[in-house]
Image: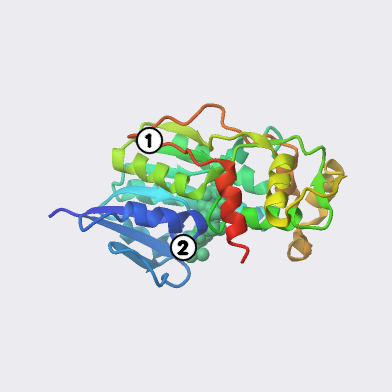
Amino acid sequence: MAVQRIFLTGATGFVGSWLLPRLATGPGVEVVCPTRGAEPTAAPMGARFVQADLERPDTYAAQLEGASCVVHAAARTGKARASEFERANAVATGELVERAKAAGVARFLFVSTIAVRYPDKRAYAYARSKETAEEIVRASDLAYTIVRPTVILGGRSPLADSLGKLARAPVLPVFGDGRARVQPVHVRDVAEYVAALVHAGRFVRETIDLGGPDVLTLEDLLRRMRVAARGSEGPVLHLPVRLPIAVLSKVEEPILGLLPFTAGQLSAFVNDGLCAEEPPEIDGVRPRTGVDEMVADWVGGLG
Ligand SMILES: NC(=O)c1ccc[n+]([C@@H]2O[C@H](COP(=O)([O-])OP(=O)(O)OC[C@H]3O[C@@H](n4cnc5c(N)ncnc54)[C@H](OP(=O)(O)O)[C@@H]3O)[C@@H](O)[C@H]2O)c1
C-alpha cells in the first residue's frame, strides 16, 4: 500500500499535539515530525519524530523527500527578542519553503496568527515575523493554505494560563479600556479544521481566518474566567496600556525573563483579534465550540 507522508512541524507544541493524532489517521499515513527535543511518550501510530532544528535546514531537508505536503505549525511563541522571532518564524519559514520546493513537495499549509491583522504591529515582533512568513509563503509558487487562528483556548492553553493569572488576582487588572474584542477558538477545533483541510487536499492559495462562534471583549472574557474560578466578579482595575507598550517596546529585550507581559503581548488589549470572514466549512468541519466550554476547560485544569 502506498503510504502518504505528511511533514508536520511543531508537533510537540500546544496546537501540534492536538493536530498530530488527527493527521496520523491510520496505516496509510506517516507523519514526520521534526523536533529539537525528545519524542513525546504517547505519539500516535504513524508518527515518526526526527531530531531537527528548523533554523538548520540541513537537519531536516532529507525528511521532506516523498512528502505529499508540509504542515508548518512550529513557531517561536511567548517571550523572545525581535531577532529571535525573525529567525525562527520568518527566516526559517523561508528556508522550509525553499527546501519543500527542492524536494518536490508542492503543498504547504502554514499556521499563522490573527495578530497579523493588527493595524499597528510596531511593538509586536512576533506578529511582524508571522506577517513576513505569510508573505514568503504567498510569494512562493506553492499550492498553499494559510490559516490564521485567533486566541486559542481549551486544553492546556498557554494563553488561558496567562489570562487566568489576571482573572484570579484579588483585583482584576484590565489594561486599557478592555474593549478590544476577541473571538476565541478551541484548540480541538483548530486541530480538526487544519486536519480537514489536509484530508480534503484544499491547497488553493487562500488565507483563512479561524475563530470560534463567540465574539466578546477581552474584559468580558477575563470576567467570565474570574467568575468561573472565584465564583464572583469582584473589583476591576483599569490600567494604562499605551504608555507601558511604548516604554516596554524600547527597554524590554534585556529583561524579558523578568516581565509578566511584553509590549507585544499587551497589544491584544488594544487591537481587535477578529476574523474578517467566517471560515468556510470543510467537509462539515468548522469551529463550533463556544467560550463557555473553553472557560470550563481552563477551570477544570486548575486542579
Ligand atoms: N497558541 C495560540 O493561542 C496561537 C494563536 C494563534 C496562532 N498560533 C500559532 O499556532 C502555531 C502553534 O502554536 P503553539 O501555541 O502550539 O506553540 P508552542 O506550544 O510554543 O509550540 C511551538 C512548537 O514549535 C516548535 N519549534 C519552535 N522552534 C523550532 C525549531 N527551531 N525547530 C523545530 N521546531 C521548532 C517546537 O518544537 P520543539 O521545541 O519540540 O523543537 C514546538 O513544537 C504557531 O505557528 C503559532 O504562531 C498560536
Whether tag 1 and tag 2 are in contact, CB under 8 A, the answer is no
Q: Is residue 49 above or below residue 71?
A: below
Closer to viewer: mark 1 or mark 2: 2
Are there few (<14), some (14-19), or many (20+) residues within 10 Å of tag 2?
many
Q: Residue 115: which quarter of the image? A: top right
Q: Is residue 122 above or below residue 19?
A: above
Residue found at x 74% / y 47%: 266
Q: Residue 11's x, y, as percent?
A: 43, 59
Residue annotated with mark 2: 12
Distance from Cα at disc 1 to Cα at disc 2:
29 Å
Q: Report the colour scheme.
A: rainbow
The residue type indicated by label 2 comes to Thr
Task: Write down the residue under mark 1.
Answer: 141
* Residue shown at 21% from the left, 58% from the top: 27
Q: Earlier in the sequence, mark 1 or mark 2?
A: 2
Q: Secondary structure at mark 2?
A: loop
User: As rendered, which of 150 and 300 lies closer to the eye?
Assistant: 300
Query: Does the closest atom of ligand 1 sit within 8 Å of the Cβ of label 2?
Result: yes
